[in-house]
């Protein structure tokens, strides 16, 4: 494996609270998205893209109301 300095990375290798929070939130959102796609595919079948489009449209109107 390549060392951090050889790869052009510098730093002490520590992570901040904001960085750890961002990683945690990103991981949970990513896992939730894959779960949602799986559930939607079992319910909507081949119509999943249309279901997401309709859901997004409804969400846009909800946000702007």
Image (cartoon, rainbow, N blue to C red):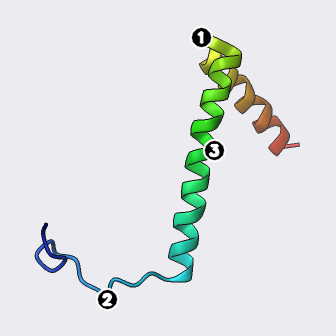
Between 9 and 61, the one nearer to me in the picture: 9
Residue 42: where, in percent of width, then height?
Answer: 66, 18
SS for dot 3? helix
Q: Quadrant of residue 27?
A: bottom right
Residue 24: where, in percent of width, then height?
Answer: 57, 64
Q: Which residue is mark 1?
A: 46
Residue 38: where, in percent of width, then height?
Answer: 61, 28
> Farthest residue toward the top?
46
SS for dot 1? helix
Vertical arrangement, residue 4 with respect to residue 54, above or below: below
Q: Give left or right: position of 11 versus 45.
A: left
Mark 2 or mark 1, earlier in chain: 2
Q: Which residue is mark 3?
A: 32
**Is disc 3 surrounded by few (<14), some (14 to 19) or many (20+) residues within 10 Å?**
few
The Cα atoms of the two marked residues, 2 and 3, are separated by: 32 Å
Labels 1 and 3 touching (C-beta < 8 A): no
> Farthest residue toward the front?
1
The Cα atoms of the two marked residues, 1 and 3, are separated by: 20 Å
Residue 51: where, in percent of width, then height?
Answer: 69, 21
- Residue depicted at 44% across the width and 81% down the height: 15
Q: Which residue is mark 2?
A: 12
Q: Quadrant of residue 18?
A: bottom right
**Is disc 2 surrounded by few (<14), some (14 to 19) or many (20+) residues within 10 Å?**
few
- Residue depicted at 62% across the width and 20% down the height: 41
Vertical arrangement, residue 58 with respect to residue 19, above or below: above
Mark 1 or mark 3, earlier in chain: 3
């Amino acid at each position: 494996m390549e060392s951090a300095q050889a790869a052009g990375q510098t730093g002490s290798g520590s992570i901040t609270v904001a960085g750890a929070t961002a990683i945690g939130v990103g991981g949970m959102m990513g896992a939730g998205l894959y779960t949602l796609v799986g559930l939607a595919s079992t319910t909507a079948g081949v119509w999943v893209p249309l279901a997401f489009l309709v859901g997004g449209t409804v969400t846009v109107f909800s946000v702007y109301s």
